[in-house]
Amino acid sequence: MAGKTNEELEKQAETAPEQTNTDQQLQAVVDPECLIKHPLQFTWTLWYQEMDRSKNWEDTLNEVTSFSTVEDFWSLYNHIKSPSDIKAGSDYSLFKTGVRPMWEDEGNKRGGRWMLNINRGQRQDLDKYWLDTILCLIGEAFECADEICGAVVNVRPKGDKIAIWTANFNNRDAVLSIGRIYKERLGLKFPITYHLHKDTMVKSGSSVKAAFTV
């Protein structure tokens, strides 16, 4: 096979700087920082539950996906419905991977939850409160992060609820710290209450006495 002619070699030499410049431009456009994902302290799993009285409660609990980086969280959040757009009687739950959003789970059964009640007139605040809640969870807002299990939003016709679940109600200082920080981060001007799972399992609604209030 004949070698390249001088004319061809000269053309290649002339175009080489152009190719180099193009490569440099591409590197400038694609910031290496954009290719790096920022890990979270924990891996989190999103669950979705829709009320269906023909099924057992646990059978209605659906695991959606898990994420462990900031970028994967936003990718998920921007592609799912907001709480205000899901069917009444449905729940979103965001829990540390390995902990199921149920009172009986080993990670939850000795704990309780900080409750935020949102009446029908506050529906416009639901999505903001939920986003702020999960950002508190994944953004390491709490000093006692190991005590955090997850969060749940219950969408109901008569009024919605958001709750942060903690691991052990006996860790009083940690529980109170979480409640105070949560209330401050959400800018709440009204009290929030903490209820023990063991009490909620045997009682319901307003009959459950609050263990703590902040």
Image (cartoon, rainbow, N blue to C red):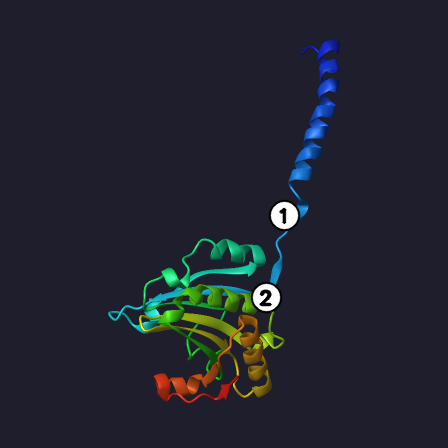
Residue 151 image point, x, y percent? 47, 71
- Residue in the image at 40% along x and 63% along y: 83
Total count of labels: 2
- Residue type at tag 1: Cys
Residue 3 appears left or right of 41? right
**Is residue 138 positioned above or below 6 on the image?**
below
Q: Secondary structure at mark 2?
A: loop
Residue 166 appears left or right of 25? left
Mark toward the start of the polypeptide (1 vs 2):
1
Residue 28's image quarter?
top right
Residue 211 image point, x, y percent? 48, 89
**Is residue 5 positioned above or below 44 on the image?**
above
Task: Indicate the quadrant containing the N terminus: top left, top right, bottom left or bottom right.
Answer: top right
The residue furthest left is: 54
Near mark 1 (Cα within 10 A), the count class, few <14, some 14-19 or many ≥20, is few
Q: For the residues marked 1 and 2, what is the alpha-carbon distance in whole angstroms?
A: 19 Å
Q: Secondary structure at mark 1?
A: helix
> Is mark 1 in CB contact (under 8 Å) with mark 2?
no
- Residue type at tag 2: Gly
> Considering depth in this image, is 38 or 122 the residue closer to the camera?
122
Q: Which mark is residue 34?
A: 1
Residue 22 image point, x, y percent? 68, 30
> Considering depth in this image, is 203 or 182 the residue closer to the camera?
182
Q: Which residue is mark 2?
A: 139
- Residue in the image at 40% along x and 57% along y: 81
Residue 78 appears left or right of 3? left
* Residue 153 visible: yes
- Residue in the image at 42% along x and 56% along y: 80
